[in-house]
Image: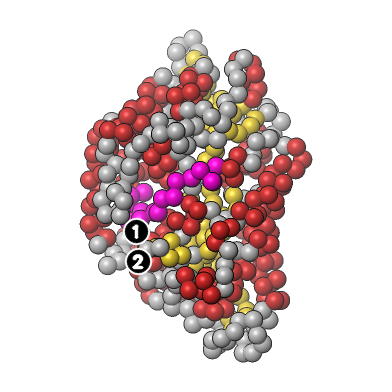
Amino acid sequence: MFKMSRNLILILLGAVMLLVVTACVPAASPAGDAGAGGEQVTIRFVSNHGDVEVPIFEEVIGKFEAEFPNVKVDYLNATSQFEDTIKTQGVGGSLPDVWYARTFLTSDYATKGWTLNLASLIDRDDVDVDDFWAAQIAQMSYEGDLYALPYDFSNVGIYYNKDIFDEMGVDYPTSDWTMEEMAEIAEQFVEKDADGNITRWGLNIFPWSWPWLGILQANGGAIFNEDQTECVINSAENLATLEFFKEMRNKGIYPESGATPEGLEPFSNGLVAMTFEGSWGTQGTRDRVGDKFDFDVVAMPKGSTGRRGITPAGGAWSIASTSEHPEEAWEFIKFLTSTDSTNTLISDHMRSIPGRKSSVPRWTEVALSGELPPANVGVFGEMMEEAYEIVYPQFWGDYDIAWSNLMVPAIVGGDGVLGPAEALEQMEKQCNEAIANSQ
């Protein structure tokens, strides 16, 4: 049973206001064949993106309405408390026809019965799912069926400051490097002042939950059992990985929480020689670095299993199971996720990796135009083929909160935090309590 959190209670009034805004559309009967002429149908579409992207969505919507003149798309870009509002609408049975559904939440939404099972429509219309990333298909599926179509997909690589490497006479990292080699290379760049205070670190990391699913698995550690009925994160393999990173932190290879100057982004300001960076971060890194130095990107290192620690996360589009116009909504998300629309929405503007493989060449072409760094930017698309095909479970929200409270401090350190062994023990306990509560 869905339990309303304190967050939902606090934002309920705002959610009701959003319902009023988004629900006031002309009543219409289902049109049956969405491509044919006939009675006008309006579908509600809600995204969760930056304001600068609204005109791009409006451009694609305009093209769709021109091709399907009997379908009007009532579009709203909602940014504040988006997911809590979606949950409130789901409980109230007033979800939009189509909305932005992160792949973290596929199982949660499907279990609650909020999203339409797309399997029969995909089979009927022969949708080319082979053009989607295998890892994203896994994340958009529940009990073997797709409940969403893809928008974008994000993974993580490691950017490195070529000028610092050149100054130190260190060879650039290559795609076959290991986590041990990453630590050895990064340690060479650690610098301290006369008082022993670190002034430059070798590496900056992301301690977030979803990239670490891959890091742990690449070193042989599991997180859940096969059917996701039990959390098994408290293992010797995972402890070894966390101890490895703790040793890196103790050596000053990556900064402890609060160690870097507030307000200064470490990589662009030369405080670290290398940094974890997402596939979405190319343009932002260019803007921050400017002409300060040259940089490039390399794939995530390999773990003890010989695999890279790659667990992407992405955005997708779902149809509400309560939609009165499922055919029109289906035509819309097919259009929204076509190669042409994906190029317009993502590749032409260098967002994260497109959810369609056929849009990646365009993304890479745009990323390399102007001969700006990183020259190896195409590695983000290449890494997608190596990603773990993990399904984010129904209780992912609880897992993510527990990770933030327990594991992030264990990774980045600070005063009074639990050590790796204690953090893993508590993490497994809280996770299994969340599993029990979700059943």
Please report the residue visible at 29 percent of the width from the left and 49 percent of the height from the top.
Answer: 225
Q: Is residue 302 visible?
A: yes
Closer-to-camera residue (124/174): 124
Q: Residues within 10 Å of mark 1 (few under 14, many from 20)?
A: many
Q: How is the image coloured?
A: secondary structure
How far, Cα to Cα, is label 1 from label 2?
Answer: 7 Å
Cβ atoms at labels 1 and 2 below 8 Å apart? yes
Task: Where is residue 166? Give x, y as percent.
Answer: 65, 18
Q: Residues in magenta?
A: 383-400
* Mark linked to residue 276: none
Task: Where is residue 19? Give x, y as percent.
Answer: 47, 74
Please report the residue visible at 48 percent of the width from the left and 70 percent of the height from the top.
Answer: 118
Query: In the figure, 388 relative to 69: above or below?
Result: above
Query: In the figure, 307 relative to 313: above or below?
Result: above
Q: Which sits earlier in the primary sequence, circle 1 or circle 2?
A: 2
Q: Is residue 21 visible?
A: no
* Element class at badge 2: helix
Please report the residue visible at 49 percent of the width from the left and 65 percent of the height from the top.
Answer: 148
* Element class at badge 1: loop
The secondary structure that most of the magenta stretch takes on is loop
Please report the residue visible at 58 percent of the width from the left and 28 percent of the height from the top.
Answer: 174
Locate residue 160: give its quadrant.
Answer: top right
Which residue does the numbered mark 1 point to in the structure image?
394
Q: Residues within 10 Å of mark 2 (few under 14, many from 20)?
A: some
